[in-house]
Amino acid sequence: MIRINDDITIQDWELSESFMRASGPGGQNVNKVSSAVELRFEAATSPALPAPVKNRLKRLAGRRWTLEGALILQCDETRSQARNRDLVRERLADLIRKALVAPKRRIATRPTLGSKKRRLKAKKVRGDVKSMRGRVDPDD
């Protein structure tokens, strides 16, 4: 069971873990021990998460979100399977905590009179610079 906050806990039946051989350091042990962990969380069907949190989680997950609505996280940082398992579970909890925070709504504001005047003045100056780049008449 993973505790996200006071209201949300992810039950073990919602998670499935698979173990595989990790790349990287490990010496002779690397070819024998399956220390890498792949955690699969069926987020789309999870009763613990409200719909808006699921939508934000999907956006945050990016490529790690499958077409079936599962979130897949992998970890092969350490040589210990138990440590990798703890790390990937902590990453899942952090990702869900980030998805719990609703983004602040942007309040539309109008540009100030000063900013409009500065913008138009900058455009006028730039236009004058460009107009000076034309051909020069020998008559003038």
Image (cartoon, rainbow, N blue to C red):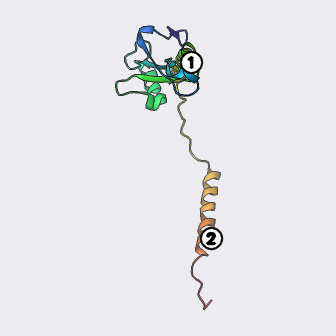
Q: At x 39% / y 22%, what residue is drawn?
A: 70
Number of marks drawn: 2
Pick out the residue farthest to the bottom.
Answer: 139
- Is residue 52 visible in the rendered image? The answer is no
**Relative side of 58 to 78, left or right:** left
Q: Which residue is mark 1?
A: 87
Q: Earlier in the sequence, mark 2 or mark 1?
A: 1
Camera-nearest residue between 86 and 124: 86
Q: Quadrant of residue 98?
A: top right
**Residue 68 at x, y percent in the picture:** 34, 24
Of the 4 image quadrants, the one containing the C terminus is bottom right
Query: At label 1, which amino acid type do we have?
Result: Leu
How packed mark 1 is, by other alpha carbons closer than 10 Å (few <14, some 14-19, many 20 or more), is some
Camera-nearest residue between 127 and 72: 72
How packed mark 2 is, by other alpha carbons closer than 10 Å (few <14, some 14-19, many 20 or more), is few
- Is residue 29 visible in the rendered image? The answer is yes
Per the image, label 1 sits on a secondary structure element best described as helix
Pick out the residue farthest to the left.
Answer: 68
Q: At x 44% / y 27%, what residue is drawn?
A: 58
When the figure is inspected, residue 137 is found, relative to residue 88, above or below; the finding is below
**Residue 62 at x, y percent in the picture:** 46, 31
Query: At label 2, which amino acid type do we have?
Result: Val
Per the image, label 2 sits on a secondary structure element best described as helix
Q: Which mark is residue 129?
A: 2
**Residue 35 at x, y percent in the picture:** 52, 18
CB atoms at circles 2 and 1 under 8 Å apart?
no
Q: At x 58% / y 19%, what residue is drawn?
A: 79
Camera-nearest residue between 48 and 71: 71
